[in-house]
Image: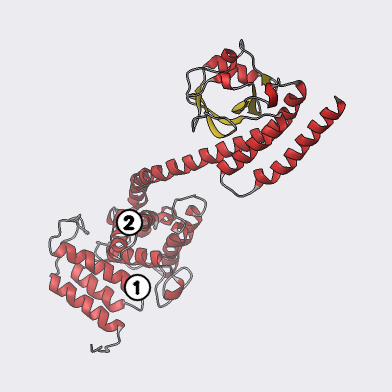
Amino acid sequence: MQKNNLRRLLRTVEALSDLGPEMTAEREFPQTARAMVSALLQAGGAREAVLFTFSDKPSLLTSIAAEGFALMPEPAVIPLLPKHVHALTSARGPIALHSGSYDVFLSANGNVAPELFKCIAPLKVAGKLVGLVALGRREGDALYEDDELDALELLCNYVALTVNNHALSQTLAQRVGENLRLLASLHGFYDTALEAFAAAIDVKHVNIHGHSLRVGRYAGAIGEAMGMDPADVAALRSAGYLHDIGKVAVDKRLFGKPTALDPDEFREMADHTVVGHQIVSGVQFPWPRIPEIVRWHHERGDGSGYPDGLVMEDVPMPVRIIGLADTFDAMTSQRPYREPMSVGGTLSEIVHLAPQKFDPNAVQGLLVQIRRDAVGSSRTPFLADRTAVNIAPTDIDQLAANLQHKLSHGRLYLT
């Protein structure tokens, strides 16, 4: 008897040593599950075994691997009543079944008869049921004795952890999928919330009311005309809403001053880029480039901008687009010290300043959107009826040609 017990213990230790690498290997879970079933067969001295996972909504056992059974559906499913879940959760170790105990632990309402099983071992982690091991007949139809049950219990502790880890990874994958589906609606929520925030940023003076909203919408439309994907367009729009957030710290009197700012006043106004960067750097947005856009939207391609004097190569494309949208709205808006410029005059000046100060691709995107307005496109108007489009489509085409001519330095290419 002692020799048999020693052999059983050695076989269990051997099964554990073989199973360890199987559990930790980078492989598909069904393959790991089959390896665990083989180890359970060896530990219990059984001819038949099946491994179930447990889900609690609804309470259900579902097979993930089986071996030895002649008639075992794939998957085998056993619904559980609350009394079954309680009995399995309360059980201390594996249980040898008999005719009077099936109904205590298992339901007969599934697609597999509980009577096929001669021994069960609930799989628990931290007192929570995560699965079940069910063994069928043994060689010679021998009964399951304490030695087999002890060996099975030792192995099931490791199997339970593996099954639980798999369930957690499945739940995580499901949650990631749900989060991705929610992200689309989250973008809509951000848009609405940030629109309200943009309106609050611009309360300093009547002449800048709506500025941040327009910059966000202009930037998104320019990005769209440049062929950016919807996520990047949404990021541009949101960055535009927030680009002037640092102005909440600027003295209100500066916004209504009817003359040019003196050097100290200009420095205070210019500091809104740095203050805004400090504000948004501590916020986790879905779009990681918002802080740099807030800081650099007054940088220009020739290094004449602020606060860091960057040149075009150092300025990311989203920043260039926001800077252009910001400039376009500022030039076409009334200010205490000047009247608004016309759309045509503004575009002419912007094309004149490209590519030295403004990115030519972004300028081309701006021309595309305003041309759509000029020809009466059925799309949502770029200017949204705020400013009259006082420029003909042919004049916009001429500006686009002038821009292209500047980029090619007047060279002609013959085909």
Let me know if residue 292 appears in the view: yes
Which residue sits furthest right?
A: 2
Question: Do tag 1 and tag 2 residues touch (Cβ < 8 Å)?
Answer: no
In the image, taking residue 251 as reference, residue 158 lies left or right, namely right
Residue 196 is situated, as x and y percent measured from the top left of the image, at 34, 45
Which residue sits furthest top?
A: 100
What residue type is disc 2 on? Gly
Q: Mark 1 points at which residue?
A: 359
In the image, taking residue 368 as reference, residue 322 lies left or right, namely right
Front residue of 328/168: it is 168
Residue 340 is situated, as x and y percent measured from the top left of the image, at 22, 65
Specify the label residue 216 is tagged with.
2
Residue 89 is situated, as x and y percent measured from the top left of the image, at 62, 21
- Residue 53 in the image: above or below residue 379: above
Residue density around tag 1, few if under 14, some if 14–19, many if 20 or more, within 10 Å: many
Quarter of the image where the C terminus is located = bottom left
Residue at left 20%, top 72%?
345
In the image, taking residue 26 as reference, residue 372 lies left or right, namely left
Residue 183 is situated, as x and y percent measured from the top left of the image, at 40, 45
Q: How far apart are marks 1 and 2 (CA)?
A: 18 Å
Which residue sits furthest front?
A: 140
Residue at left 51%, top 23%?
112
What residue type is disc 1 on? Asp
Residue at left 61%, top 16%?
87
Specify the label residue 68 is tagged with.
none
**What kind of element bears circle 1?**
loop
